[in-house]
Amino acid sequence: MTPRKVRGANKTHRPPPSSPRSGVSREVTPRMDGTRDRLLTAARSLFVSRGYHLTRPQDITRLAGLGHGTFYLYFANKQACFLAFAAAAKEELDQFLQPRVSGANGLETYLSSLIDGLLDYGTENPGVLQTAVGEMSAIAPEEAVDLPRHWAEGWARGLQDAARHGAIADDYDLDIIGAIMVGAIGGAVAAASRGADRKHVIANARRFLIRALKPGEEIRSRTSTRAAK
């Protein structure tokens, strides 16, 4: 007697998709990237307007025009989505500032370009940086994007050329100065957002930083002596 075939016996077993509760998102193929962009665009709008804690995954998918389960194909949870938003904001600002500061010649031009660029970004993307920095401290995961530290390191590198040419006191630690600049320039951006005249903000912030950074007479004399040798 010929044995009966069991229906489905030759079918390849496929594991079920991960559930929202599993905490693991499925692998995303390149074809699906457009959907991820839609989710991040919606998440960005809601995180900025509502804040992290008042934004739910279902709100994000609804605004993106997608089914609720789609969220978990891309992000394990809301925290992972926020981290992706913050990382995207970091890259976006870097790309926005790079062409402005890369051609800056001298300390004064560099600082003006940097402050002007940050003001422009804030005008074109209201609330994005404030949300990415402020809400990050609230969720504080180990893998969080440390935006202030990232900016401090980048701006410290931007000062190195001025330091080599003696425009900055040589007894400064540029890594620490970069961190101080984050606070100073952040204050300038805040002043502009409260209605202070843009040109006045840039001029005052630039003068303040240049006067703080420039070498004193003793240091200038020492630098000139070394150069003469």
Image: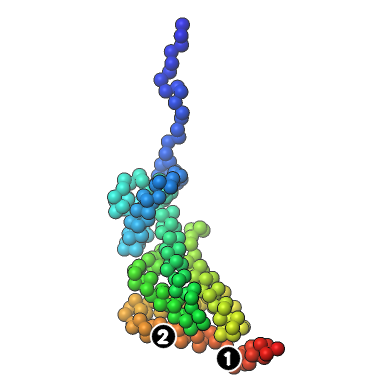
Query: Residue at point 49% right, 65% down?
Result: 146
In x, y percent, where is residue 62?
A: 29, 51
Q: Is residue 173 left or right of residue 47?
A: right
Element type where label 2 sits in the image: helix
Q: Residue at x 41, y 54 (%)?
A: 81
Q: Who comes first in sequence, dot 2 or dot 1?
A: 2
- Badge 2: residue crowd in 10 Å (few <14, some 14–19, many ≥20): some
Q: Nearer the viewer, residue 164 or 132?
A: 164
Residue named by callout 1: 216
- Residue 137 visible somewhere in the drawing: no
Instruction: From the viewer's side, name the closer residue of 92 and 148.
Output: 92
Residue at image mark 2: 203
Where does the image place residue 148, in percent across and percent down from the top left?
A: 48, 69
> Is residue 15 at least partly visible in the picture?
yes
On-image quarter of the C terminus: bottom right
The amino acid beneath tag 1 is Gly
Three-letter amino acid code at the position of disc 2 = Ala
Identify whether 181 is placed above or below 9.
below
**Percent coordinates x, y for residue 126 in the rendering:** 34, 69
How many numbered marks are there? Answer: 2
**What colour-coding does the image apply?**
rainbow
Q: Residues within 10 Å of mark 1 (few under 14, many from 20)?
A: some
Which residue occupies 34% across, 53% down?
Answer: 38
> What residue sits 36% from the left and 60% below the top?
44
96 or 18, which is in the foreground? 96
Label 2, label 1: how far apart the Cα atoms are? 21 Å
Residue 170's spot in the image, x, y percent?
A: 61, 83
Cβ atoms under marks 2 and 1 closer than 8 Å: no
- Seen from the viewer's position, the closer of residues 44 and 50 is 44
Q: Quadrant of residue 197?
A: bottom left
**Would you place residue 137 above or below residue 117 in this image?**
above
